[in-house]
Amino acid sequence: MKASTAKENILRKIRQALSTPVPVPFPLSEGTESVFQPKTQDNEIEFAERFTKLQGRFAFCANETELAEQLQILLTARSWQHIYCVEETLKSNLDQSALNISFTNDLPSCEASITSCECLVARTGSIMLSSSSPSGRTTSVYAPVHICIAYTNQLVYDIKDALQLMKEKYGANIPSLITLASGPSRTADIEKTLVVGVHGPKEVFCFLIER
């Protein structure tokens, strides 16, 4: 009897609510238009601004020669001796630039890792990586510092553009892992205090080369 009475009360309240509808508090939230504004500047500038706001370190290079110069300055300033890199094409390009780099295959003991990427997402300042690369799932996560080498023709504006690029590139063979790295690892799980480098690299560098 009590259950039946409770049910009737609920149905009565629903009928009353339907007869006197309340205006939607945020009418624009139910529209079909994107909540994100279209881009107002070049992807290179948009990415650089977003990436640096997320504590990423950004450098623009006119060509591979300038990349070698800027990368060598960074390595010398940090006194890094052991750099993890398992992408043969990337290693070959860096060797051709006559960089004084000692590559290592030991990820746990490296001082920094160097990888390529699938693309750069300008609107979010993110680096898109996937398991299709020899760097795999671990390089950009377990190295204390992640250095990404990318080209301007890898820039897209939004995440949907990046996913479309992946679909066109791989077709039905989409990599089993696709991830977005937006600056160094950050967490505020402990007493709501922001801590950098807990679940990933403490620093992320992106060298963008004109192409």
Image (cartoon, grey):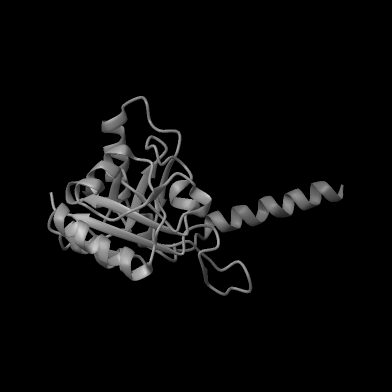
In percent of width and height, residue 21 lies at 50, 59
Q: In terms of depth relative to the viewer, which is nearer, 141 or 37?
A: 141
The answer to whether residue 156 shows anywhere in this view is: no
In percent of width and height, residue 81 lies at 40, 59
Kindly give the residue lying farthest to the right in the view shown: 1
In percent of width and height, residue 135 lies at 41, 41
**Residue 164, quarter of picture:** top left
**Residue 170, quarter of picture:** top left
The answer to whether residue 71 shows anywhere in this view is: yes
In the rendered view, tell whether residue 129 sits above or below residue 125.
Answer: above
Q: In terms of depth relative to the viewer, which is nearer, 118 or 209?
A: 209
Residue depicted at 67% across the width and 54% down the height: 12
Residue depicted at 25% across the width and 54% down the height: 99
**Residue 208, quarter of picture:** bottom left
Residue depicted at 17% across the width and 47% down the height: 153
Kindly give the residue lying farthest to the top in the view shown: 172
Residue depicted at 32% across the width and 41% down the height: 163
Q: In terms of depth relative to the viewer, which is nearer, 65 or 50?
A: 65
